[in-house]
Amino acid sequence: MTAKETLPELLQALEHGTDELSYRAAMAVIAMNDPSVTNELMSILSRSECKEVRDHAIYAVWLVGNEEAVPGLIEVLENAKEEVHLRGQAAEALGSCGYGNESAMEALRKALGSEHAEIRLFAANALAFCGDERAIPELTELLTDDARVADFGTVAEDARHAIKEIRSREEEGE
């Protein structure tokens, strides 16, 4: 049986399995490195009410997704009813899936003003990856933001890193 042939079973396990099985299914989908699964992963994200399943689906989108995920990721990022952790993951995934997408860049710049440190931190991190120089004014405002996100550091540290990355890309002419 080929990897493509196992995809339906993996997606079923991701959505309906135990936390451990869901996680392992997500890792298997990621290992396939097939962006064509983006829509299926986003469908799981939108219809599941299970926190762990949603975490696993958005993580897989972040690593293998493509621009098709941008509208759904923006929806998660901007939805105040979503868990902050998931909104932060959506910001980080936008950095990967939304590279060069104007809607994604706009949503990430807007997220820098979030009341939640985790969202600000991951938006800054995503913008570092994307190299959006239009974000430098908002990132500069975050240089004094000492809010700490467990296991990741402060918002100011990520803002500083993002500015450095963006400026280095400008110097390299990217």
Image: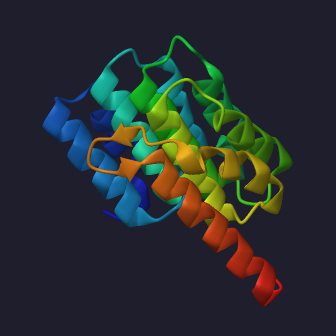
Q: State whether residue 170 appears in this view.
A: yes
- What residue is at 51 percent from the left and 30 percent from the top? 87
Vertical side of 154 occupied by 43: above or below: above
Vertical side of 134 occupied by 19: above or below: above
Write down the quadrant of residue 126 in the picture. bottom right
Give the camera-side residue of 18 and 6. 18
- The image position of residue 61, as x and y in percent, is 50, 48
- The image position of residue 153, as x and y in percent, is 35, 51
Vertical side of 125 occupied by 54: above or below: above
Write down the quadrant of residue 22 in the picture. top left
Give the camera-side residue of 127 and 19. 127
- The image position of residue 45, as x and y in percent, is 48, 28
- The image position of residue 154, as x and y in percent, is 41, 48
Give the camera-side residue of 20 and 32. 20
- What residue is at 80 percent from the left and 62 percent from the top? 133
Vertical side of 87 occupied by 39: above or below: below
- What residue is at 76 percent from the left and 88 percent from the top? 172
What's the coloring here?
rainbow
Classify the position of the C terminus by image quarter. bottom right
Q: Is 133 situated left or right of 166 in this image?
A: right
Q: Is 139 situated left or right of 122 in this image?
A: right
- What residue is at 55 percent from the left and 35 percent from the top? 42
Q: Is 140 situated left or right of 116 in this image?
A: right
